[in-house]
Amino acid sequence: MKKLLPTSTVGSLPKPAWLAPPEKLWSPWKLEGDHLLEGKQDALRISLHEQQLAGVDIISDGEQTRQHFVTTFIEHLSGVDFENRKIVKIRDRYDASVPVVIDEIARQKAVFVDDAKFLRTQTDKPIKWALPGPMTMVDTLYDNHYKSREKLAWEFAKVLNEEARELQDAGVDIIQFDEPAFNVFFEEVNDWGMATLERAIEGVECETGVHICYGYGIKANNDWKKTLGSEWRQYEEILPRIQNSTIDMVSLECHGSRVPFNLIELVRGKKVMVGAIDVATNIIETPEEVADTLRKALEFVDVENLYPCTNCGMAPLSRNVARDKLSALSAGAEIIRKEFGI
Ligand SMILES: [Zn+2]
């Protein structure tokens, strides 16, 4: 029988300090050339091992081979200048140094497929691979060519689809698109955000998911959250669109957030990766706190569709904190399994 309440992470996990300085985004690589390639694979092995030790059921690559969940994908495309970067305000919130689109974009070669094949050889557990969604990609660069967010999103959807099909062929079980931008630009989600995301999964037969969150636990995001009031109802704008889409799963931020749990009802029938670990604090959740979040979610999602998860990626956390949080996630899920006698 398939294990119920399979646990997973959103995607990113901290890297070892010998590969990239910890606890920051866009952390530069410490190795070069062949040493870097080997170092990335070693980090991936360690990340896999740590996830398995912590009892995680659906394994991710911990994003050990990428500097950033969006810009690394963009930098592998032609038509992009990533040496002469520009500073832009992303998610309407904070400045970031981003690549520049200078010509028609194309995917000349696979981006993560070799990494996925490598991870596939290392474990028999199901694996999940995260890709940036088209809208979040558009929102994490400077466009000097298309001059239209929508037009560029359709181009990205095309190359993401090429990558997704090859990841599926490499044995990936779940492909997840990260779309934190969905939580900010509702009109664009309606106009073209969902449509381009569905284009990205066209013909993909493995499971597909979308992760929508309130961002990494960095100061700009934490400050933004303070302005969102006593109830965060952003998901109310988006989940009805997800419900009517071909996406199989949705990954949401729940624990420690002000998202009303009853909004999860809007995607009844879809699989829901419920964020039961807060990535914006170093305090380790107790298993009982995790179980409590899962119990609240279970009022609005059927038990066979509940996937305990983290609120977002854990790249900016320390390795110890991330490890302990993953163990708490597994222990919390186990409490609920026992309650259901499964
Ligand atoms: Zn996130």
Image (cartoon, grey):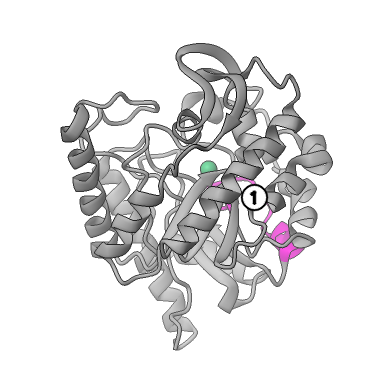
Ligand 1 within 8 A of label 1's CB? no
Looking at the image, residue 38 sits to the left or right of residue 141; the answer is left
- In this rendered view, identify the residue nearer to me: 73 or 78: 78
Q: Which residues are magenta?
A: 252-267
Name which residue lies at 31% across and 40% down: 14
Any magenta on residue 255? Answer: yes
What is the x, y in percent for residue 49? Answer: 22, 59
What is the x, y in percent for residue 289? Answer: 45, 60
The correct choice, above or below, for 96 with respect to 251 in the image is: above
What is the x, y in percent for residue 241? Answer: 79, 54
Any magenta on residue 18? Answer: no
The correct choice, above or below, for 155 with respect to 62 in the image is: above
- In this rendered view, identify the residue nearer to me: 36 or 270: 36
What is the x, y in percent for residue 152? Answer: 69, 30
User: Which quarter of the rendering shows the N terminus?
Assistant: bottom left
Name which residue lies at 18% across and 41% down: 38
> Dot 1 corresponds to which residue?
200
User: Mark 1: few, some, or many residues within 10 Å (few <14, many ≥20)?
Assistant: many
Name which residue lies at 61% across and 35% down: 136
Name which residue lies at 83% across and 39% down: 191
- Where residue 25 sits, quadrant-wise, is top left
Looking at the image, residue 117 sits to the left or right of residue 200; the answer is left
